[in-house]
Amino acid sequence: MPTRTPIRDEEHAMQYALRLLGYRPRGEEELRRRLDRKGYAPLVTDRTLAALTRLELLDDRAFAREWVTARAGHGPARLKQALRAKGIARDLAEEIVAAEVPADEEYARALAVARRAVPAAAPPLDRDALLRVRRMLQRRGFSFGVIGRVCAQLTDHLTEEGDWLE
């Protein structure tokens, strides 16, 4: 079996990392985990990530901003939690989510999600239907204040026939 040289490992690691980034953007920590799982030495992984950062192909801030923007149906709490799970630093995750999802945008997102969840032909929301909407919005990471406003808006803007009043 041929021996592996560090230079050859770095070339392989770079090709593997570029292939992963070709599928979709990734954060530095997520890419580090994938390289580690593939069995590359820590030094090879560090050099590969440093090279990708120098080439501006790896940027946690840009990745987090793009990721948050693509998930319009989720609230700030869920977005922060998901970014943390992807290896984005807590302060960066909070900064990006606060910038990309201000309070008025959170309300607009929650209302859009709730309107899609409530069938247009449904009769006015009863207590159980309203509870289902509340739970769904909670699971998606919206704040309790926003959820309360959305539920009030839903009950105020449905006619007897279930049509939306604009």
Image (cartoon, rainbow, N blue to C red):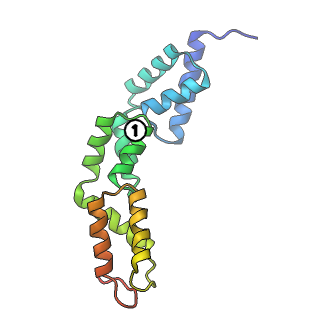
Which quadrant of the structure image shows residue 61?
top left
Locate residue 105 relative to residue 12 in the image: left or right. Answer: left
Q: Which residue is mark 1?
A: 84
Instruction: Give how far across and how far down residue 123 sits, in percent.
Output: 42, 86
Q: Residue at x 44, y 71 (%)?
A: 117
- Quadrant containing the N terminus is top right
133 left or right of 11 in image: left
Q: Quadrant of residue 86?
A: top left
Q: Secondary structure at mark 1?
A: helix
Placement of 7 over or under 135, stated as above or below? above
Q: Residue at x 45, y 83 (%)?
A: 122
Between 121 and 152, the residue placed more toward the observer is 152
Q: Is residue 76 above or below residue 38?
A: below
Residue type, numbered disc 1 = Arg
Position of residue 105 in the picture relative to residue 22 (left or right) = left
Q: Residue 145 in the image: state x and y as whole percent.
A: 26, 61
Residue at image coords 30%, 84%: 165
Q: Please tell me whether residue 28 is drawn above or below residue 159 in the rendered image.
A: above
Q: How packed is label 1: few (under 14 Cα within 10 Å), some, or many (20 or more)?
A: some
Residue 26 in the image, given as x and y percentages of width and height: 46, 37
Is the residue 94 above or below the residue 101 in the image? above
Residue closest to the far front: 127
Nearest to the observer: residue 156 or residue 17 = 156
